[in-house]
Image: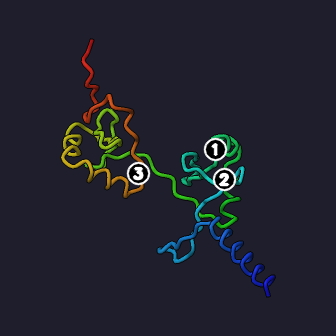
Amino acid sequence: MRSFSAALVLALMLCALSAAATVQSTDAAAGKAVTSQTMCPIMHGKIDKRYYADYQGKRVYFCCPACIKEFQKDPAKYVKQLEDSGVTLEKAPTPQTACPVTGDKIDKNYYVDYQGKRIYTCCSGCVEEVKKDPAKYVKQLEDQGIALEKTPGPAADSTGVCPAPAK
């Protein structure tokens, strides 16, 4: 009886470990289980979300920077391996190309920096509009899957003009 109990405990532990290796959720729109990526496609180690590459609108995570270089030699091969194993890759964020106020093409000379994120606009009039409620525009863009650029550092103010005095 003791060996049966030990075998049962061991079997349950193995099931728990294999379940922990794969993160699943349900895609409400499709009504199917979604398996998120947890393992590096190159070295098969645990992913670190600081290391990734985007390929054909999909984001692939890695355990280290060296794996990104290996992936780039044949990205289609690794994406296929992941998807064939049942992994649903995250959608890669889209860069901002349209003004959040007018929908026109952005001009990178016009922007507002807000909480470490840069919101581009098409003109100075839209800069003034975004300044009234930058959080609204950050949310609007991010809800559309748009990845806002990070601000380059503390030297720039919210109008895109360096505040340092001219020499």
Q: Which mark is residue 27?
A: none
Tell me which amino acid carries mark 3.
Answer: Ile
- Name the quadrant containing residue 164: top left
Find numbered disc 3 in the image and state the secondary structure of the residue it sits on: strand
- Name the quadrant containing residue 115: top left
Image position of 156 with respect to 99: above or below: above
Foreground pick, 23 / 79: 23
- Name the quadrant containing residue 125: top left
Q: CA distance from mark 3 to mark 2?
A: 25 Å
Q: CA distance from mark 2 to mark 1?
A: 9 Å
Q: Position of residue 54 (x, y in %)?
A: 56, 48
Are discs 2 and 1 less than 8 Å apart at CB?
Answer: yes
The residue positioned 71% from the left and 50% from the top of the image is 42
Tell me which amino acid carries mark 1.
Answer: Cys
Q: How many marks?
A: 3
Q: Which mark is residue 40?
A: 2
- Residue 4 relative to residue 66: left or right: right
Find the residue positioned furthest to the top: 167
Find the residue positioned furthest to the bottom: 1
- Residue 105 relative to residue 95: left or right: left
Q: Which residue is mark 3?
A: 146
Q: Position of residue 22 (x, y in %)?
A: 63, 66
Whichever of callouts 1 and 3 sits on the residue coming sooner in the sequence is: 1
Image position of 13 with respect to 116: above or below: below
- Which quadrant: the N terminus? bottom right
Image position of 110 with respect to 61: above or below: above
Q: Nearer the viewer, mark 1 or mark 3?
A: 1
Q: Which mark is residue 64?
A: 1
Foreground pick, 133 / 22: 22
Tell me which amino acid carries mark 2.
Answer: Cys
The residue positioned 39% from the left and 45% from the top of the image is 148
